[in-house]
Amino acid sequence: MDFNDTPTEATYRAKAHEFLASHAPSKKLPQQALASQLSQVELLKAAKTWQSLKADHGFACITWPKEFGGPGGSAMESVIFAQEEEQFDIPLGIFQVSLGICMPTVIKLGREDVKQRFVKPALRGEEIWCQLFSEPAAGSDLAGIRTRAVKDNDEWVINGQKVWTSNAHISDFGLLLARSDPTVRKHQGMTMFWVDMKTPGIEVRPIHQISGKSGFNEVFFTDVRIPDSQRISEVSGGWKAALSTLATERLAIGGAKGADYEELIDLALKTPSGDQSVMQDAVFRQKLADWYVNAEGVRLTRLRAMTALSRGETPGPESSIGKFIMAAQLQDLSDYAMDLQDQYGIINDDERSPLAAAFQKGWLKAPGSRIAGGTDEILLNVIAERVLGLPSEVRVDKDKPFNDLPLGR
Amino acid sequence: MNFDYSEEQKLLQQEARKFLTDNSDCAAVRRILNHAEKSFDDTLWSSVAELGWLGAIIPECYGGLGLDATDLCAISEELGRAITPIPFSSTVYLFTQALLLAGSEEQCTSLLPKIAEGNLIGCLATSEGPGVRTIEARVERGQLNGLKLPVTDGDIADFAIVLASDTRGCSLYLADLRAGGVQASPLATLDPSRGAAELKFSNTPVERLGDAGNGHMLVQQIFDRAAIFIAFEQIGGSDAVLEMARDYALERYAFGRPIGSFQAIKHRIANMYVRNQIARSNCYYGAWALEAQSAELPKAAAAARVSANEAFRFSAKESIEVFGGIGTTWEADCHLFYRRAKQLALAVGPTAVWRERLATELERVTTPTV
């Protein structure tokens, strides 16, 4: 076993590092990072500038073939670049849905003229896409969507509501899944379209989250008319298309970023406990060990996946455990870190709270992390069914027309 | 980046699995479990010696195969899968490691070839009773007096390495258990497929192993190394018991469907998988640290130990829950894993001790931010 790059990988890493070092500032403390210094508008501008610079130097969408503007690199190169990029203060994540989820679907299923028109501007960050899938009544059970698409001559009329749409407020276009035929079984009556977010009848409202932030939106469709040429899937072929989108989503959604064991040790060393620091507390040390083992286990599991990539193999299913473990850990560890601060823990203030309120922020973010990109329960189902070969849950809605399904609330 | 077994190691592992499937199934474990007078499978022990596994990490100059630590890890994983009833961990992970770490040339030359041939069973005797206590076994003028218990495989071992106090504090001593002056009394244990004894030393002639006064430090170094190999046995056992529960959940029907289609059962088994993967990754890092003789070895060993203890503990206990009532019977194989999981979890000290050790290592390498 070794952790060294192959000579080719090392050359690529050096090239990536050289590019980053000459164009990006190195990483700072969270409270001094670009993301907390710039307004949302400035941040978006900075992100777009960075994306186009990456595209100019062949570091955007590294695995994409040349015909779509990518450098046609390997999955390993993509991982190496991401590792290097993490060391710099760059507004990351804005293009994750656009390039990690939407464009692969457009490339796979879109008409030739659609690909020609959209892929390159998206890659350069000039245009941003969002994913209009989830609905108030269709989260884990995505095939339960109710947004209607009704054919009217050569047009479709869309009515309904989407929710949890990341970046909808800054997006130019969206990938829309809608119900085109409610008289057939639920998985059969869906169709996928692309929409211009400026189309009349589309209204975007930000969702105010527990954390105080608004990373998601509700998107309302009222008599939105789109031409049939904006159809991405076959009529009623939407579910198959959505599955291919979701497969790339699982790869694109990473861990649950937030304060972890290193920050916890930092806090413990600074927090008094009688004559000593909390670091000397036996209960603290027991808990710390378990959290370290989990975080390190997830990090090392990623290295196992990288090993597979490096050998030209597909990583095994073990990579699916990362988000499941780390989201729960973010919640428990943050919770305990605030306990360590005693009564002071209720203060949520960047200036007064230890580590710029990293644990207070983590605690407020964690419930969402446990749900986004697959709830704990869905992820365990995925492991049970796809890895361990256990049967799926009995589905009582499978053989009935969508119209006949009970609605609940 | 190569954070996985190599192709050769995968082959070695496959061969080990095939051999153990044919020669040491659960029925073989039961033959030891059900017979009070037999505490290990001597036929399997001879076969394992013939395969060279006992001398896997013994250098060729001492009659071993001179393989890498990770090669042995691949074998350990399979020994753990098969919950083999042989004194492998005592002899190879503890006794051999102690000799390799601290043995004199003469001690290595006289003992290691016998281990590799399968003609010497070794054990390590550190414990004297519940809890952490002052070592009372004492060596004076080359003679050992005192009581050690439990000593895993002490009932069948030929030699023991004993932690004893002396004029310099605590040191390790090598005792020939066949030379007289030692009384070995078998103990009733949690996992009768792995024997243990009380060893009573009365003026037993011993020779020192390693530097005087270094006993505790050496034990810790031996434990660090053994913990990694044992952790591989644990992930092997934990995977095996997970598969057993999975297979049962597919075959057992209740309420008109396989119980494995209920999320309550699926999630229980999926959680076993998650813990096994966390442990496996930590174990691989331990193997790397061992092979690379990294300064991170104590930390890596503790992380492998803590995660593997927890993984096997969890899957062994939860698999009985998946089996339901039948899982609590002597006839079902669940308890073989339940017993072995606890036996291994206590072997070189419990989880809490290793968590503390891990915290010490983390504290040592951290400097607070300003």
Image: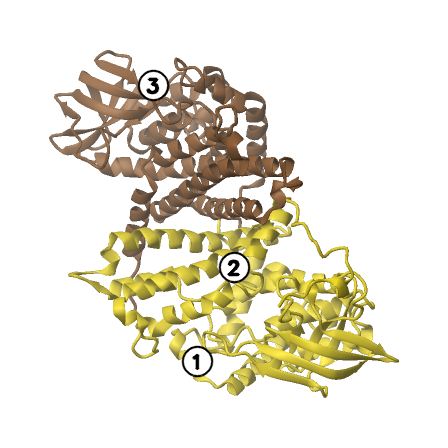
Q: Label 1 sits on what residue type? A: Ser
Query: Residue A371 or B300: which is nearer the viewer?
Result: A371
Query: Residue B265 or B289: which is nearer the viewer?
Result: B265
Q: Are marks 1 and 3 on the same chain?
A: no
Q: How is the image coloured?
A: by chain
- Rendering coords of residue A309 (x, y %): 60, 54
- Rendering coords of residue B83 (x, y %): 48, 28
- Say the numbered circle drawn on residue A323: 2
The image shows a total of numbered marks equal to 3
- The yellow-tinted chain is A
- Rendering coords of residue A151 (x, y %): 84, 76
| Res B365 quadrant in image | bottom left
Distance from disc 1 to disc 3, alpha carbons, whole Å, reads 65 Å
Of the residues under marks 2 and 1, which one precedes in the sequence?
Answer: 1
A173 shown above or below A246: below
Left or right: where does residue B169 sit relative to residue A223?
A: left
Q: Secondary structure at mark 3?
A: loop
Q: Label 3 sits on what residue type? A: Ala
For the residues labelled 1 and 3, say whether their Cβ atoms are less than 8 Å apart.
Answer: no
Q: Choose mark 2 or mark 3, whichever is in front.
A: 2
Q: Residue beneath label 3, please?
A: B157
User: Chain B's shade in the image?
Assistant: brown
Q: Are marks 2 and 1 on the same chain?
A: yes
